[in-house]
Image: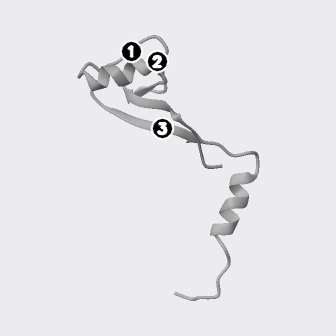
Amino acid sequence: GGPMSTEKVTIIHSLDYVIPGTNQMNDYCAITFNEQIANDIAHGKGPAQYKIMLGFCSWQPGQLEQEMDILIAPTSIKV
């Protein structure tokens, strides 16, 4: 797991912006992996609402569960 491909930009945004490569996710937002959207946002021509993310996280089957087991350990402390 952990951050990978941090040089890649992913932008989730409102549906008021559509260019080639934009994929609508649901009735409220879309996702675009295209550099053009970043340039449009910088020049005030992008979507009204957006979230910019760099890279992504990925886990192999069962890996996340194993990592969670480390974080969630039994305890004898009573609250």
Horizontal side of residue 68 vs 35, given as left or right:
right
Please name the residue shown 46% across and 10% down the image: 20
Badge 3: residue crowd in 10 Å (few <14, some 14–19, many ≥20): few
- Earlier residue among tags 2 and 3: 2
Observer-side mark, 3 or 1, equals 3
Tag 2: residue type? Thr
In the displayed structure, 79 sits above or below 66; it is below
User: CA–CA distance between discs 2 and 3?
Assistant: 17 Å
Please name the residue shown 49% across and 15% down the image: 21
Q: Which mark is residue 54?
A: 3
Residue labelled with disc 1: 18
| Percent position of residue 62, x then y | 76, 51
Label 2–label 1 contact, CB within 8 A: yes
Tag 1: residue type? Val
SS label for mark 1: loop
Residue labelled with disc 2: 22
Badge 2: residue crowd in 10 Å (few <14, some 14–19, many ≥20): some
User: CA–CA distance between discs 2 and 1?
Assistant: 6 Å
Horizontal side of residue 55 vs 59, given as left or right:
left
Please name the residue shown 47% across and 31% down the image: 9
Horizontal side of residue 20 vs 39, given as left or right:
right
Q: Quadrant of residue 67?
A: bottom right
Q: Quadrant of residue 35?
A: top left
| Percent position of residue 14, x then y | 35, 27
SS label for mark 2: loop
Label 3–label 1 contact, CB within 8 A: no
